[in-house]
Image (cartoon, helix red, strand yellow):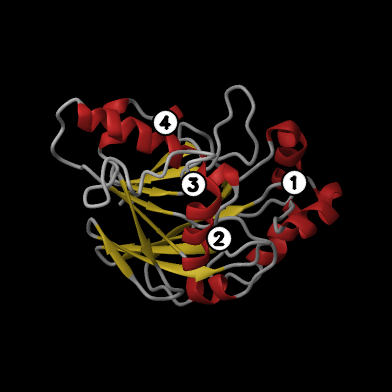
Amino acid sequence: MRIKVLGCYGGQLLGFHLTSFLVNDSILLDAGSPTEGLDLEDQFGIRHIFLSHTHLDHIKDIAFLADNRSLKRLGGARENRQIIVHSLKENLEVLRKHFLNNHVWPDFTKIPSIDDPILAFEEIKPEEPVEADGVTITAIPVNHPVPCTGFLLEKDGQQFIYTADTGHTDRIWEVANAQPNLKGIIMDCSFPNNYERLADISGHLTPNGMAKELAKFNKLGDVPVYLYHMKPETLNVLTAEVEALYLPHLRMLTQVDELLF
């Protein structure tokens, strides 16, 4: 299993891309910035998007991926004609009503035709595994102001967890502790410690909050933990606070990272 970081930040400034992780070249975990991190040919390899929730920094590039795919098809491409968006029923309804609604963006679930659209929606249910291109992916509910799930990924007997955006939560740590061959975790750490109230209100974590969450993880120190969703404006302060915790096998992600298992 290979996870390429396309974007790992919780805000967009010059040089900082929003959340998106590419798994084995064909699966996206969230779609904040794939068109900024991939050329057209690599974008064309994407067949699945597993969407954690519908905040804009996680859905933005669904619009532009669909647009680019439609142009690729018009140019004569016959393979990878469709991208399947997998998410909770509530999230798919939000996309239909508020995003791909022919007002904010064209409805690519009906373009170029209802029978052969660019985008297809497939509902996922919590803790019911889905297979996509050889990877088994299971949605695990987490604590965020809108319906949101992290994801457990499994391939060839190895597991990986992406918490997505979350505040203090429990179930995903129970799932993490139950995995026999867990290779890593990507988890939220958005704001410096003095923004704790904002983190709590918005369903995110500070370094101190992140450390409290990791106290629930039985394999801390044995399994690498990677932090994402850092706010670029406060990155220096956040980095210093994370380093001051001296937690083993913990580091912040960057946009050049590629995780191999």
Residue 191 is marked as: 1
In the rendered image, residue 141, in percent from the top left (x then y), is placed at: 54, 70
Residue contact at pointers 3 and 2, CB within 8 angstroms: no
In the rendered image, residue 250, in percent from the top left (x then y), is placed at: 58, 50
Q: Distance between the residues labelled 4 and 2?
A: 35 Å
Residue at which label 2 appears: 221
Asked if residue 161 is positioned above or below residue 126 in the image, the reply reads above
Give the residue drawn at x 46%, y 74%: 126
Residue contact at pointers 4 and 2, CB within 8 angstroms: no
Residue at which label 4 appears: 35
In the rendered image, residue 148, in percent from the top left (x then y), is placed at: 56, 63
Residue contact at pointers 1 and 2, CB within 8 angstroms: no
Earlier in the chain: of badge 3 and badge 1, it is 3
Viewer-side residue, 64 vs 232: 64
Q: How far apart are marks 3 and 2 (CA)?
A: 46 Å
In the rendered image, residue 199, in percent from the top left (x then y), is placed at: 77, 54
Asked if residue 124 is positioned above or below residue 226 in the image, the reply reads below
Q: Is mark 4 on a helix, strand or loop?
A: helix
Q: Nearer the viewer, mark 1 or mark 2?
A: 1
Residue at which label 3 appears: 101
Viewer can see residue 50: yes
In the visual, does 196 lie left or right of 43? Answer: right
